[in-house]
């Protein structure tokens, strides 16, 4: 939910395809984080959860690439012109972090499975080729990186949600509405009080 200053005819909302990608990927990413935690804590459920974890991860990688391409070639709603500079910087930095994480997480997972010498099974007999050499030491490094990146991604998501709620409930500046899954009414605009001369009746509502 970011862009440049509101000028030059920027759209008020992200298009339907961008909103579909945003909310669909949000659901999948949260599912993947919970599945990852469950895989670590339960060895009994690990095989069945792993069967879901790998294909969803690859699907997220494909969707992340598609979303990045769509964002590069489609104009996005602009940030409010009165947004403080530090918030503008934080918005852009958080989006860079989100896109980097969405691309890095599945790639590191794919490489981790390859380094372990295991096939990357999507479903049935559909396997992905290895992208890393079979090496136990490299697998250990990738596994650690995957775990820490998952924590970092969760932190960025929480900050992203907090910022979205701030725009929706505090600033009410249209930023949240631009990515809302369904059209929402325009955010209320506060008007400065108008001084009236003596004997001038108030304006009718």
Image (cartoon, helix red, strand yellow):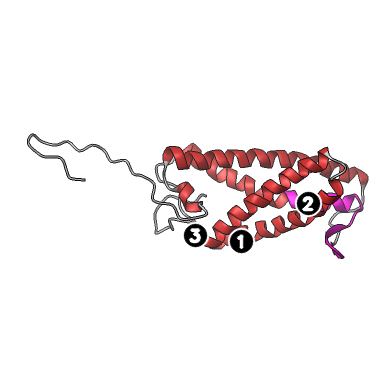
Mark 2 falls on what kind of element? helix
Q: Which residue is mark 3?
A: 75
- Say few, some or many: other residues with alpha carbon within 10 Å of mark 3 (under 14 / 14 to 19 / 20 or more): some
Residue 32 horizontal side relative to residue 46, left or right: left
Residue 136 horizontal side relative to residue 4, left or right: right
| Magenta run includes residue 162 | no
Residue 84 sits in quarter = top left
Residue lying at 64% horizontally and 61% vertically, measured from the top left? 66
Residue 97 sits in quarter = top right
Which numbered disc covers residue 53?
2
Q: Nearer the viewer, residue 189 or 48?
A: 48
Q: Nearer the viewer, residue 121 or 106?
A: 121
Mark 3 falls on what kind of element? loop
| Magenta run includes residue 123 | yes
Residue lying at 52% horizontally and 54% vertically, measured from the top left? 181
Mark 1 falls on what kind of element? helix
**Which numbered disc flags the more N-terminal residue, 1 or 3?**
1
**Which numbered disc flags the more N-terminal residue, 3 or 2?**
2
Residue lying at 63% horizontally and 47% vertically, measured from the top left? 98
Which numbered disc covers residue 69?
1
Q: What is the quadrant of the C terminus in the image?
A: top left
Over which residues does the magenta segment extend? 105-128
- As measured in the structure, the alpha-carbon distance from the residue carrying label 1 to the one carrying label 2 is 24 Å
Task: Give the residue at the far left of this rendering.
Answer: 199
Residue lying at 89% horizontally and 57% vertically, measured from the top left? 119
Q: Is residue 72 visible?
A: no
């Amino acid at each position: 939910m970011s862009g440049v200053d509101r000028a030059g005819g920027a759209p008020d909302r992200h298009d339907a395809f961008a909103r579909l990608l945003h909310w669909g990927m949000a659901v999948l990413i949260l599912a993947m984080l919970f599945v990852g935690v469950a895989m670590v804590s339960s060895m009994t459920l690990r095989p069945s959860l792993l069967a879901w974890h790998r294909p969803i991860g690859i699907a997220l990688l494909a969707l992340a690439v598609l979303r990045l391409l769509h964002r590069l070639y489609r104009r996005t709603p602009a940030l409010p012109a009165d947004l403080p500079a530090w918030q503008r910087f934080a918005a852009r930095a958080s989006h860079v972090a989100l896109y980097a994480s969405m691309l890095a997480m599945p790639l590191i997972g794919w490489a981790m499975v390859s380094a372990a010498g295991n096939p990357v099974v999507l479903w049935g007999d559909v396997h992905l080729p290895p992208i890393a050499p079979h090496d136990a030491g490299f697998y250990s490094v990738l596994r650690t990186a995957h775990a820490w990146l998952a924590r970092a991604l969760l932190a960025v998501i929480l900050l992203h949600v907090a910022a979205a709620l701030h725009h929706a409930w505090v600033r009410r500046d249209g930023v949240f509405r631009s990515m809302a899954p369904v059209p929402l009414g325009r955010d209320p605009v506060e008007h400065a009080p108008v001084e009236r001369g003596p004997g001038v009746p108030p304006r009718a509502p």
